[in-house]
Image: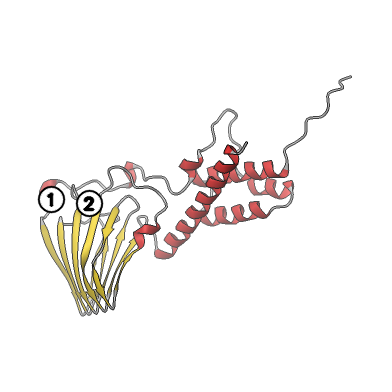
Amino acid sequence: MSNKPPVPGPTLAEKRETTVQLLIDSFASDRLSVEEFEDRLDRAHRAGDAGTLESLISDLPVPVAGRTPSAPAQAAGTPAPRPADRPERALPDEVRERQFMAAVMGGFERKGPWVPARHTSFLALMGGGVLDFREARLPPGPIEIAIFALMGGVEIIVPPWMGVDSGGIAIMGAFEDGHAGRTAPLPPDAPVLRIGGFVMMGGVEVAVRMPGESASAAKKRLRAERKLLKAAEKDAQRRESP
């Protein structure tokens, strides 16, 4: 008869760590939606017993033995989009050097697979415009937009893989650089959009959204990505602790 003492099972803290890591891996692998991930992550941190933790992952695939879990740095934030997710660059002979757009007491919208010029001037006079670059076939090199808005505004929507350098003069208005809210680093070959100009009693707003994503869905995604980043950082700290 063996006299070996029984091997103690994992503690609640260890089970919580395992549960959080599996949720992170599942979210990063698109097995959980934004809403499901947010809900389960909150419940995992509040759980007071092992049974509750097990119920949160009972429908998720168990990692294969020997498989290396996703690294926190990879899980944090949205991964850089695959090349297939990004529209092809425009050919040099398709790209105009300059173009002019205007919204005068009305609206102007450009979206879909359009080809922006290298230098664009936009006039918004008591009107508004929307420039959506998410499906645009971009020219090589940086793209420049000069905006003059008087009692009007321009909304610029860019995908997560596009860099933005925004600045200008605003009097009783604003240049709102919403691209700073992105959570994932830009890929090395990211195209760059440079925005400048003059705004009086109006505004220029830059928003980051995935193709086909609404403003409300983008907010939910960013909120989930920040939670994912925080969970991954905590997991990394626990792993580094002696």
Residue in front for this viewpoint, 215 or 148: 148
For label 2, the SS is loop
The answer to whether residue 41 is seen in the rendering is yes
Q: Are marks 1 and 2 in contact (CB under 8 Å)?
A: yes
* Residue beneath disc 1: 94
Residue at 63% across / 41% down in the picture? 18
Residue in front for this viewpoint, 95 or 72: 72
Measured in 3D between alpha carbons, the distance from the residue under mark 1 to the one under mark 2, in whole angstroms, is 10 Å
Tell me where residue 130 appears, x and y as whole percent: 27, 67
Residue 237 is left or right of residue 101, and the answer is right
Label 2 neighbour load within 10 Å: few <14, some 14-19, many 20+: many
The answer to whether residue 133 is seen in the rendering is no
Residue in front for this viewpoint, 26 or 206: 206
Residue in front for this viewpoint, 168 or 18: 168
Residue at 48% across / 46% down in the picture? 76
As drawn, the residue found furthest toward the top would be 1
At label 1, the amino acid type is Glu
Residue 234 is left or right of residue 103, and the answer is right
Please tell me the numbered disc located at residue 137.
Answer: 2
Q: Is residue 50 above or below residue 146?
A: above
Q: Is residue 226 above or below residue 106?
A: above
As drawn, the residue found furthest toward the right would be 1
Tell me where residue 1 appears, x and y as whole percent: 89, 19
Label 1 neighbour load within 10 Å: few <14, some 14-19, many 20+: few
Q: Is residue 30 above or below residue 210?
A: above
Tell me where residue 185 appears, x and y as whole percent: 37, 47
Residue at 57% across / 43% down in the picture? 237
At label 2, the amino acid type is Arg
Tell me where residue 141 appears, x and y as whole percent: 19, 48
Residue at 83% across / 23% down in the picture? 4
Closer to the chain start, of discs 1 and 2, is 1
